[in-house]
Image: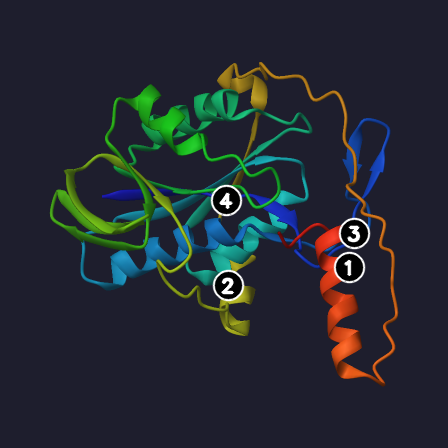
Amino acid sequence: MKILTLIRQVPDAEARVKTSGNAVDLEGATLVMDGMDEYGVEQALRVRESGASVEEIIVLAVGPKRNEDALRTALAMGADRAIHVETDERLDPIALSRVVAQVAQAEGATLLLVGGQEADWDSQALGAATAERLGWPQLTWTNELKVEGEQISGRHDVDEGNESFTAALPAVVTTQQGLNEPRYPTLPNIMKAKKKELRKDTLETYGAKPAVAFVGAEIQSRARLNRLIDGKDPQAAAAELLNLLRNEAKVLA
């Protein structure tokens, strides 16, 4: 069995970003592997460590040159090799699924792990779109996964509890928080990762073109009005606070 895991690089949650023209300017921002994708890499490694017959773990990134850092991190975690489809175009999930599906077929992958949600753009469509292209079953928002022979089983949470599932490989699995705790690469593995294969492809190879045009970006800002309440009289202060919350902030009925 070959496992293909898609990874992306996103701004750190604490990073400050700005806009430039009609796009978000990431110049100087701290970038990290998307946390949902880290779960995918870690789960691929755990499937192999559980004794399943895993021939190879391949990580794939589609995006700018800076994605090499995330790929090297995945290789240092334990992935065997990486593929980078380098492009500065921002692909919508449907266009991106075209690339991912072609790579999965070309590499002979039978298990595809995709982040359940993009940390930056909040899209959840990629796993479903790729599964549709491949004609594979999709198991979404997975927080427990086991592979036994040609079968996978697992569980995911729903509003009122959880659901368990089984499916035959090949399959697409999307991850969510709670699936595992990703490991930190050790220094020896970081050094080994520098010697692992990282193949470069062009977007033109896959014939994918974005169907959605990105026309603008805006940083949301919220004006804050600070009000100081005299606390000498606790009862009066509490009454004033309730009045402000009810009549100005309008967060209380």
SS at mark 3 in the image: helix
Dot in front, 2 or 3: 3
* Amino acid at the residue labelled 2: Lys
- Which residue in the protein does label 3 denote? 248
Dot in front, 2 or 4: 4
- Which residue in the protein does label 1 denote? 244
- Which residue in the protein does label 4 denote? 7
Dot 2 or dot 4, earlier in sequence = 4
Quadrant hosting residue 229 = bottom right
Dot 1 or dot 4, earlier in sequence = 4
Dot in front, 1 or 2: 1
- Which residue in the protein does label 2 denote? 192
Q: Left or right? Give the position of 133 relative to 1.
A: right
- Height in image: 51 above or below 219? below
Residue drawn at x 18%, y 37% is: 169
x, y percent for residue 196: 49, 53
Dot 2 or dot 3, earlier in sequence = 2
* Amino acid at the residue labelled 4: Ile
Dot 3 or dot 4, earlier in sequence = 4
- Height in image: 73 above or below 117? below
Give yes or no for contact between labels 2 and 4 (Cβ–Cβ under 8 Å).
no
SS at mark 1 in the image: helix
Q: CA distance from mark 3 to mark 4?
A: 45 Å
Give yes or no for contact between labels 1 and 2 (Cβ–Cβ under 8 Å).
no
Categorize mark 1 by other alpha carbons within 10 Å: few (<14), some (14-19), many (20+).
Answer: some
Give yes or no for contact between labels 1 and 4 (Cβ–Cβ under 8 Å).
no
* Amino acid at the residue labelled 1: Leu
